Amino acid sequence: MSSDIIGFPEPILLLSRKRAALFASANALLDGGAGELADKASVLAVEVEDQIAALVPMTPAAAIAQFRVSCDFAREIEWDEWADKIAANLIAGLERIERGSSAA
């Protein structure tokens, strides 16, 4: 087995699922006429997106997971600043991993 298998619970995966659930709730609330509650759920989902953007991967598996999640988001939204933050953190994480492996 590879050491790159993503362990559960990987924070990026949990946050991604939380974001999806919040947006699903927001859509259901909006469809049900509860616009104010839908707005609150959307704000919470955006806060989760900010948490995801702030993550710096610590393992190659986490970097892969973050990249996959960011690709999914890119299909849904066009938010260049957020995508730039994801890319910068992904690069920082890979550089950290590289420094750690070269020190061994």
Image (tube, rainbow, N blue to C red):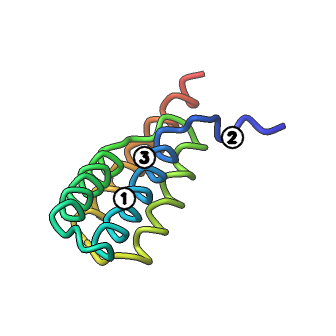
Q: Quadrant of the C terminus?
A: top right
Q: Is residue 34 left or right of residue 52?
A: left
Q: Are marks 1 and 2 in contact (CB under 8 Å)?
A: no
Q: Earlier in the sequence, mark 3 or mark 2?
A: 2
The quarter of the displayed image where residue 38 is located: bottom left
Which label sits on residue 15?
A: 3
Front one among 40 and 11: 40
Q: Amino acid at mark 1?
A: Ala
> Across the whole image, how many numbered discs are drawn on residues?
3
Q: Are marks 3 and 2 in contact (CB under 8 Å)?
A: no
Tell me which residue sits at (19%, 57%) in the image. Answer: 40
Q: Are marks 1 and 3 in contact (CB under 8 Å)?
A: no
Distance CA(mark 3)–CA(mark 2): 20 Å
Q: Position of residue 102 (x, y in %)?
A: 56, 30
> Could you tell me which secondary element the residue under label 1 belongs to?
helix
Tell me which residue sits at (57%, 52%) in the image. Answer: 64
Q: Position of residue 89 (x, y in %)?
A: 35, 48
Task: Estimate how packed mark 1 is, as few (under 14), some (14 to 19) or many (20 or more) residues with alpha carbons within 10 Å.
Answer: some
Q: Is residue 6 left or right of residue 77?
A: right
Which label sits on residue 4?
A: 2
Q: Position of residue 14 (x, y in %)?
A: 49, 43
Front one among 96 and 61: 61
Q: Earlier in the sequence, mark 1 or mark 2?
A: 2
Q: Nearer the viewer, mark 1 or mark 3?
A: 3
Q: Position of residue 11 (x, y in %)?
A: 47, 39
